[in-house]
Image: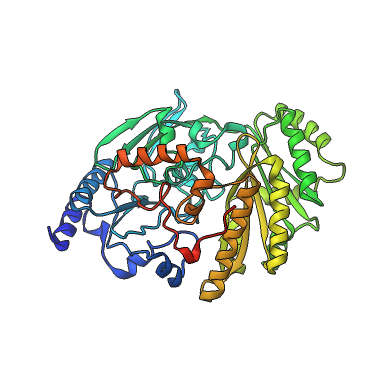
Amino acid sequence: MSESELVKEFISICGIDNISTNEMDIVAYTSDLASLPPLIKQVYKIKSPKYVVRPSTTEQVSKIIKLAVERNIPFTSRAGASSGSGAIIPIDGGIVLDLTQMQKILKIDENLLQATVQPGITWAKFNFQLNKAGLMVGVHPSSSPSATVGGFISTGGYAGIGAPKYGAIAQQIQKLKVVFPTGEVLDVYPPFTSLFTGAEGTLGVITEITMRLYPLSQSIFPLAFGFSDISSFISSLDTTLKDEIRPYHVMVLDRHFLDVSKSLGMDVPKDELLVLFTLEGPESLIEVDLANIRTSFPEGSELSKNIAKEGWERRFSAELFIKRAGPSLILIEIGAPLKIVPQIYKTFQELGTEEKVKIGFCGILGHGATMLCMPFILTDERKGMDYLKVLSFSRKLISNAIKIGGVPYGIGLWGSPYLSFIYDQEHLKVLSAIKKSFDPKNLCNPGKITEDRTPEQMRPPNP
């Protein structure tokens, strides 16, 4: 089958408007949220995809994958591309399955408190429809306006709005419909759904998700606190959690983050750290939690209601807002137990001082007393060598965080050098065996999760 014949097959499956081989269209599918200058593509030998296909049903996905397997063509699925780990970059070229057409809410069952959706729907659109029905999800990412349900599941979803109270996304899933790398379609139920949570699309393409729902919040109560240092904040937060208080959302922003926000026209407090702390639930229970929180947090640390309200209203744009000052942003995501967050933060600041690199910090409380630590560096990918140096420095930050006890959140392409530090050898063997069993030809998002294709000149220092 020639390339033109293959395109005709794709058109017969999805329609001519949902197929592209245009070079200008394809460029948009060679990177994710993180900037990817041509130099990096050359160093990593990243191949551009040949075909962009936009299916809208499970059946169409299955037919496309069967064609890909028949022709030995790699395929990579993606939707909102709101992560920066390189997980959806099609490094071996081939086919990109753009799932953004698959954005239907298939069913909302108010009696069973569950909904079934396609993977390409954004959390913002999903939540909007649920809220009209008096319902809500337990957890969703802070990038909800652009992040999709399928993407959040594929990257792990243990931190986000609601996670400290309701748990990680894996705990919300009741069924997945998956197109396996052979084209076979199966319904997958817990506990086997956990195989696909955080698998970054390497084991198959999720085409439907059934998840648990909750009654819509009776009340949302945002608070804001100012702290002089990270250790004091973590100590206060730890005390609060030990008192069985489960916040709905907690975000911490450091002085550099606040200064950048101020340069972009925002009003910010003078404190070294701004903590945005949100409670959710019946007003009577919130009142009890409020009294305990105000006891746990230092006297005089609570900031104005306006700061708290503005922080909650900006919860979906805080991290991306500062990108305007870049024009490029390198954002690192490290998961860590709360007890080591102060050490990780201190290490980042010391390394930044040594290398004369300004590092900002944003942290989001996750499930089970963990925090998603997100140091960021503003840079400019148009300055190739300078960008390369900063990117290399960012790897140094990750290595040091792993040494302390942190773990990269999402492996993707950029986290693959750390596989042997994230997993022990036996665990890695099991993951590799599962991948080979599901995908013997290694066509389903190759080069991720179980593979390390980092070129020697980009290899970071060992943790």
Q: Quadrant of the N terminus?
A: bottom left
Q: From the top left corner, tell me how far across and down residue 70 is, in percent.
A: 18, 49
Residue 370, placed above or below residue 4: above
- Work out whether residue 221 can be spotted: no
Q: Is residue 197 left or right of residue 295?
A: left
Q: Is residue 18 left or right of residue 321?
A: left
- Image quadrant where residue 376 sits: bottom right
- Work out whether residue 127 can be spotted: yes
- Report the front residue among 126 and 37: 37
- Report the front residue among 114 and 232: 232
Residue 151, placed above or below residue 295: below
**Residue at image x 56%, y 74%?**
386
Q: From the top left corner, tell me how far across and down residue 272 is, in percent.
A: 78, 56
**Residue at image x 67%, y 60%?**
360
Q: From the top left corner, tell me how far across and down residue 144 is, in percent.
A: 52, 48
Q: Residue furthest top?
A: 111
